Image (cartoon, rainbow, N blue to C red):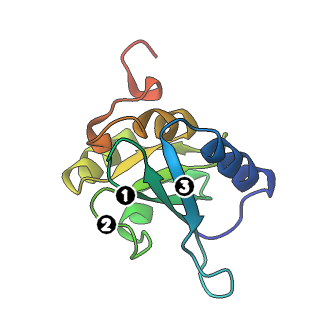
């Protein structure tokens, strides 16, 4: 894991946060000099809890990646699979849900921002119709 994302990916994500109805504010919480990861704290509207988001740069997010996630990811966090071409094992989702952590791509996080217990949200990418 690291900061190996094409520069437009964080820009697009940050612009989307700026324009999302459920985002009151957001800020980077990683240390650009020391951290290897893109980490964000998102303050949500309507009294919903803040979310710490890790924008993962992996091409294939595995169980090993999950167990080596940044220490800042605690209950209520979200692992954003940031590369559009990336994939992740849906079996990891069940493990993460037990930890009250969400995993998904762009559409998943944009939808999860509306949901109080976002780790229970089932995004379109994981619904039966796909």
Mark 2 secondary-structure assignment = loop
| Disc sitting over residue 49 in the figure | none
Q: Which corner quadrant holds the N terminus?
A: bottom right
Q: CA distance from mark 2 to mark 1?
A: 6 Å
The part of the image, by quadrant, that contains residue 30 is bottom right
Q: Position of residue 20 (x, y in %)?
A: 57, 38
User: On screen, 1 above or below 94?
Assistant: below
What percent of the width, then of the height, locates residue 74?
Answer: 31, 66
Tell me which label, 3 or 1, sits earlier in the chain: 3
- Measured from the top left, where is residue 80 in percent x and y? 51, 50
Q: Which residue is mark 1?
A: 77
Which element type, helix, strand or loop, lies under badge 1?
Answer: loop
Q: Quadrant of residue 28?
A: bottom right
Circle 2/circle 3 CB separation < 8 Å: no
Q: Which residue is mark 2?
A: 74
Q: Which residue is mark 3?
A: 25
**Residue under the point 38% across and 21% down:** 127
Residue 11, above or below 129: below
At horizontal 32% and vertical 41% (from top left) the residue drawn is 118
């Amino acid at each position: 894991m690291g900061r190996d994302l094409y520069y437009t990916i964080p820009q697009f994500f940050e612009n989307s946060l700026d324009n999302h109805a459920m985002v009151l504010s957001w800020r980077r919480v990683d240390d650009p000099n020391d951290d290897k990861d893109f980490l964000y704290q998102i303050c949500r509207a309507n009294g919903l809890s803040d979310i710490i988001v890790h924008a993962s740069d992996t091409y294939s997010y595995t169980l090993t990646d999950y167990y080596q996630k940044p220490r800042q990811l605690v209950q209520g966090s979200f692992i954003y699979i940031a590369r559009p071409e990336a994939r992740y094992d849906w079996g990891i989702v069940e493990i993460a849900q037990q930890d009250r952590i969400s995993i998904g791509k762009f559409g998943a996080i944009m939808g999860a921002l509306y949901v109080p217990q976002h780790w229970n949200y089932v995004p379109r990418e994981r619904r039966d119709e796909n």
